[in-house]
Image (cartoon, rainbow, N blue to C red):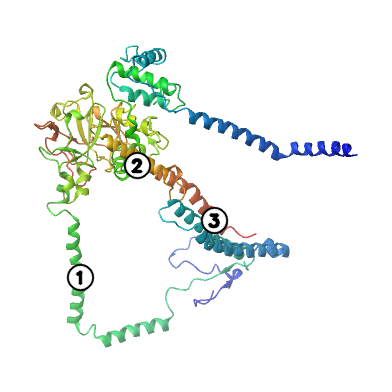
Amino acid sequence: MAAMNSSDTKPERRRRGRRSPLASVALVLTGLLITGGAYALMSAAAPANASVDLSSAQSIQQGKKLFAANCATCHGLDLAGSSSGPSLIGVGAAAVDFQVGTGRMPLAQDAPQAEVKPRVFDETQTLQMAAYVASISPGPGIPASSNLTLTGDATKGAELFRINCAMCHNVAGAGGALTEGKYAPNLMNTTPAHIYEAMLTGPQNMPVFNDQNITPQEKQDIITALKTQNKDAGVGGFELGSLGPVAEGLFIWIFGLGAVVAFTVWLTAKGH
Amino acid sequence: MASNEPTDIVPADDHGTTFTDPGTAVERADAFQNPGLPPHQLRVTDKDPKAAKRAERVIVLLFYVSVIGSVFAMAAYFAFPIKPNDLGSVRLNNVFIGLGLAFALLAIGIAAIHWSKALMDDHEGIDIRHPVAGPPPVQARAVEIFRQADRESGFNRRVLIRNGMIAAIAALPFPAIFLFRDLAPAAGTPAEAYSHTLWKQGTRLTKDPTGDPILASDVTIGSVFHVIPDGLLKSDDMLEEKGKAAVLLMRLEPGDLHVSPDRKTWNYDGIVAYSKICTHVGCPVALYEQQTHHLLCPCHQSQFDITREAAVIFGPAVRPLPQLPITVDSEGYLVAQSDFHEPVGPSFWERRGDYNV
């Protein structure tokens, strides 16, 4: 009796459980959580600071091999550049770390400007190539971690940012359009090291801000200001991407005026 | 209609075609005929008591939604207090109090409109506009009041007093004209003030905002410096002067520059300085692309080509950015050779047209 009971009810419950619409939702959720969790773990593990001695002959040798295999087609075996890529003489380790570390290089396609992509080379390989490029001719080096401590003067940094950077990168660091498809990228998720290297080397159409123009301390102030600003919650409602009057104007034209028009139509419509 | 007397609401059927526009001297034969109002149509709520009941319930519900919104706003004041030094708490406080009040107000408005549209009597009526002129007895009384006031005040009898009063009132606005003169520059005309900046021979180029002088050797190729004249930070009207004197300093390969014969000495080894004030409507032009050497104005997308002396290559600006002639002093710092050779910024009424000819 007991056996019959169990065999009667169990499949019943099971069938219902599997057919429940919530089951598929739960399945998808579980899958997403596992994938997301694994991705978060992997990406958190990736930038573990690989230590590469930039001056050692071994890393330079490794970097030379990587460079010859992956970069020399455009930049030339002797770094002198070609019709498809600029010369890398004097760009320094900072430029390599920025361009390869943000995934901009190697270039995926001929476009108005190189875009941020998932990086192709890991930290060690990037630093080895940086060591090789820096060994050919001196240039700006990778900033020391003591320059990236985010302990600068955020007020001063914000003023410097408004004067030197905000016209292209937007006052909130949200980025902005330039000419003919080029753009100044969003800085909100850029690492302090990459922001520092970009100022130092002037990648692509960004001008150079060398240490005489913006001193290392001032660079640290700017990065501190940017990171402080990103951390603070806004108090004025939706930020709409912090893009300023264009996004806000578009929003109010479409939704604000749309609501006004809809209300007006309803107000004047005859009751029926 | 027989009478011109103000009337109350008259039934729609009575709305006359008898009124003619007093400004129409000639009645056209094919004048547009007033079609009158369309026949009155009953609403669903007039015909169906159930619908009327439903509308009533909706309206009552909306009014109570409004009450809930008000209570919610009060509760939110306590539930999401503003904590010192916590901007996130300000945001929550604003959002929830605002939402409560928005629902409270919106629900009252929607309920009132719905009430009037669905349930209140909707028979069309015409409220005839009152004639502008009052009836003769009212007009006579008004004239009488004026006469009496004139008699009692002696306004037309004591002409000297009246004229004195008119003179006093007429003179009163004149001091304002002299006060407004202070809005214009103290020395010279506004046109002269527009035409000159703080730059003069030997003024050092300094960094914005620190005011530190710039060594020519520090300006590497591809660099951009945002420049203000030395002494600007100590000047009395700093912002007005900065608005005219701001300069963008760039270094290009000297071979990339196309220099006209009369500007041969204006750059220093590929270092060029241009006014940062757009010649269109005066926005700061500082979006410099170091590979294309184009300078973009963010306001209206004017583009200037720095290799060709800031010639306009796109957009609404019509004149190139004025160039500041620069050189170095004995210590190697960048200095101006002179002021700009033309007024910076957008055109103004008295600007000579021949500066760039």
Give the farthest residue toward the left: B330
Q: Mark 2 packing: few (<14 Cα in 10 Å), some, or many (20+)?
A: many
Position of B243 compared to A192: left or right?
left
Residue position for label 2: A225
Residue B207, quarter of the rendered image: top left
- Locate residue A26, reporting x and y percent: 66, 38
Q: Which mark is residue B172?
A: 1
Mark 3 secondary-structure assignment? helix
Mark 3 and mark 2: Cα distance apart in space = 44 Å
Position of B201 compared to A123: left or right?
left
The chain that hosts pointer 2 is A
Q: Nearer the viewer, residue A174 or B28?
A: A174
Kindly identify the amino acid type of the residue bearing the numbered disc 1: Leu
Q: Nearer the viewer, residue B352 or B333?
A: B333
Query: Which residue is pictured at 60% across the width and 59% down the height?
Result: A270
- Locate residue B204, reporting x and y percent: 14, 38
Mark 1 and mark 2: Cα distance apart in space = 54 Å
Is residue A110 something one can see in this rendering?
Answer: no
Query: Which residue is pictured at 45% across the width and 63% down the height?
Result: B26
Kindly identify the amino acid type of the residue bearing the numbered disc 3: Phe
The chain that hosts pointer 1 is B
Residue position for label 3: A263
Callout 3–callout 2 Cβ contact below 8 Å: no
The numbered mark, 3 or 2, whose residue comes first in the sequence reads 2
Mark 1 and mark 3: Cα distance apart in space = 49 Å
**Is residue A32 positioned above or below A171 on the image?**
above
Q: In which quadrant will I find the C terminus of chain A?
A: bottom right
The reply to whether label 3 and label 2 mark residues of one chain is yes
Kindly identify the amino acid type of the residue bearing the numbered disc 2: Ala
Name the mark nearer the viewer: 3 or 2: 2
